[in-house]
Amino acid sequence: MTTRRKFLKLSALSASLFAFNKTKATETISNLNSKQIKPVVLSTWKHGVQANEGAWKVLSAGGSALDAVEKGVMVTEDDFTNLSVGLGGLPDRDGFVTLDASIMDEKGRCAGVAFLQRIKHPVCVARMIMEKTQHVLMVGSGAQKFALDNGFKLEPKTLSPEAEKQYKEWLKKSEYKPMINIENHDTIGMIAIDANGNLSGSCTTSGLAYKMHGRVGDSPIIGAGMYVDNEVGAACATGVGETVLRICGSYLVVEFMRQGLSPNEACKKAVERLVAKNPNYKDVQVGFLALNKRGEHGAFALQKGFNYALYSNEINNKLFDSKSFLS
């Protein structure tokens, strides 16, 4: 028969062994995470390849994820042949190019700018709002004035040659019918983790082509077009913004990762939620990208045809096709 004294000794020994094993397990997980954290940058669509190059210059030099996601999407904003991002983008139905963007860092600081006209880099305006003000979202003429007061230049009103050509053709029928996977109404979303394990994200777009004047999509809205939680991961969205807004898509992806899902499973789960909430889901496209604290990534889309670019120490800036809900 086990005496009370023996029982107490065994209990104490078991407790010490449990504490030791728990400590070792924690150390093992910590070591595993430190080994797996590494610079990674992900961005939406094929124009993400060029954007990743800009971001990787920052990350490979030991720079911050925040600087990387800003510099990366600036490359796309600078590309006037791109018809979905920046001032070269297709206009709204009244002929105006209006820009939306957002940015978020590892500290939870964030800001968005919406319905901004004639300013070349809306993502930079968003970052300046984040760093210089107490606000999270500025729009329209007020956002433009803020940009001009802080050194940005007012660009010409004219459309890019290709945008003007396509707009004139559209005016013949004036039909508003966004086409699935046509990048003339898509964003660039970018998420990254740097060598220190810190996450950041950005998103920038000229919005849906031929939208109603004043329309704003998901891209400048924190938690919809992009979201970052440095304890968990980051996510961004692309496609028809109204659909993403209705489920707070990027925030939802991050919350699924918080529950233990992999980045790929989290993106898939968010698409399934979107389908459940949207009876017209077959008429739109939405894609999600996710990156967790360990540097693991994932993607999932509603329709076939969504692709994304990945740059890391192991993968030299390649374009990948995402899996989709609809085959």
Image: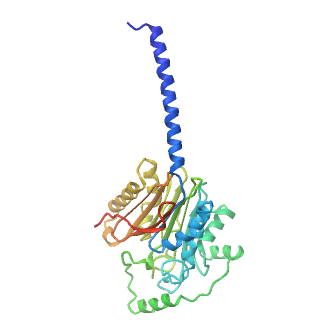
Instruction: Give above or below for 215 relative to 62.
Output: below
> Which residue corresponds to the image point at 49% horizontal and 14% vertical from the top-left?
9
The image shows residue 159 at horizontal and vertical percentages of 54, 88
The image shows residue 225 at horizontal and vertical percentages of 49, 65
The N terminus sits in image quarter: top left
Instruction: Give above or below for 216 relative to 170.
Output: above
Note whether residue 204 is visible.
Answer: no
> Which residue corresponds to the image point at 38% horizontal and 70% vertical from the top-left?
306
The image shows residue 168 at horizontal and vertical percentages of 45, 92
Query: Does residue 168 appear to the left or right of 104 in the view shown?
Result: left
> Which residue corresponds to the image point at 51% horizontal and 66% vertical from the top-left?
190
Instruction: Give above or below for 191 relative to 211.
Output: above
Question: In the rendered view, how is the structure colored?
Answer: rainbow
The C terminus sits in image quarter: bottom left
Q: Nearer the viewer, residue 150 or 29?
A: 29
Note whether residue 75 is visible.
Answer: yes
The image shows residue 106 at horizontal and vertical percentages of 59, 55
Query: Does residue 51 appear to the left or right of 324 in the view shown?
Result: right
Q: Nearer the viewer, residue 259 or 291?
A: 291
Q: Nearer the viewer, residue 212 or 304?
A: 304
